[in-house]
Amino acid sequence: MSTTRRAFGILAAGAALGAMAPAGTASAASPRPGAHRRLIARDDFCHGLGQWATELQNGGTVTASHGVLEIDVPSGATVWFKQRLEGPYVLEYTATAVSAGGPNDRVSDLNNFWNAVDVRSPDDLFATRRGGALEEYDYLKTYYAGYGANYNTTTRLRRYVGEAGVRPLVFDYTEPLLVANQPNRVRIVSDGSTVQWWNNGRLVFDHIDQEPYTSGHFAFRTVWSHFRVSDFRVWRLRPQRA
């Protein structure tokens, strides 16, 4: 059974507006006291999609060039990082919801899977075929953040348990939400039982999981939207030596 901690600054009576330091400050950048970071993965999005696997429900385009991963899709899309990640780690990227009059420029659904394992092929996520529709991911054991989902009306954290139709909610908020054409500097912390999702220096989800998912795959997930992503980095957390 998992337990949760209230995220800072979110819709709770008496909750303080904490964790508002700008991204990159000591409080935001150091999720564990005394921890050092070692870069273990990165993509500058200048050389194509070699590190990524795409699952598109009804087509669309996913490209990586000139420093930008561009996801422009009319329905469900999942873009997996091929490298399996082992915790403890911190993952960061910047994503902007594009609103410029394009057919898919609906400001909605900056979503992520992380530490994902498919129970149908637990040793190889990509051995099971999926086509981009959301219900196909019910067989994952994973964390799932949906930031500005449902036409930019909800922000939620779920902990999938690998069962069809079962997507347990951990947090369910009506803010914060996406702002069109404004960058979202996302930080995900996977540190043992500590699970966090930050945006622009604000701690959006803060969860203590007594049975944590500590390794698996990361993905960008969206539906009927247009995003530009940059500066993808993953750091290993390690304790400071005496």
Image (cartoon, rainbow, N blue to C red):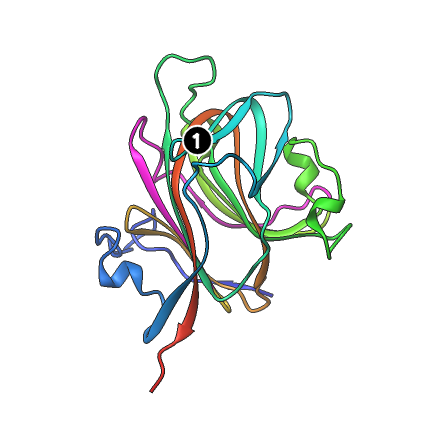
Is residue 188 a member of the stretch shown in magenta? yes
User: What residue is at 71 percent from the left and 46 percent from the top?
Assistant: 139
Residue 181 in sight from this viewpoint: yes
User: What residue is at 57 percent from the left and 65 percent from the top?
Assistant: 212
The secondary structure type at the circle numbered 1 is strand
The amino acid type of the residue labelled 1 equals Ser
Q: Is residue 100 left or right of residue 64?
A: left
Magenta extent: 164-190
Classify residue 147 by image quadrant.
top left
Residue at the disc numbered 1: 65
Is residue 96 a member of the stretch shown in magenta? no
User: Looking at this view, is 61 or 145 the one in front?
Assistant: 61
User: Looking at this view, is 126 or 48 the one in front?
Assistant: 48
Q: Is residue 101 left or right of residue 71?
A: left
Q: Can you give x and y, in whole percent of width and height, for residue 134 in the image?
A: 63, 34
Q: Residue furthest bottom?
A: 242
Residue 195 in sight from this viewpoint: no
| On screen, residue 19 above or below 3 | above
Q: Is residue 9 left or right of residue 158?
A: left
| On screen, residue 8 above or below 80 | below
On the rendered image, what quadrant is the N terminus found in?
bottom right
Pointer 1 local density, CA inside 10 Å: few below 14, some 14–19, many at least 20: few
Q: Is residue 23 left or right of residue 164?
A: left
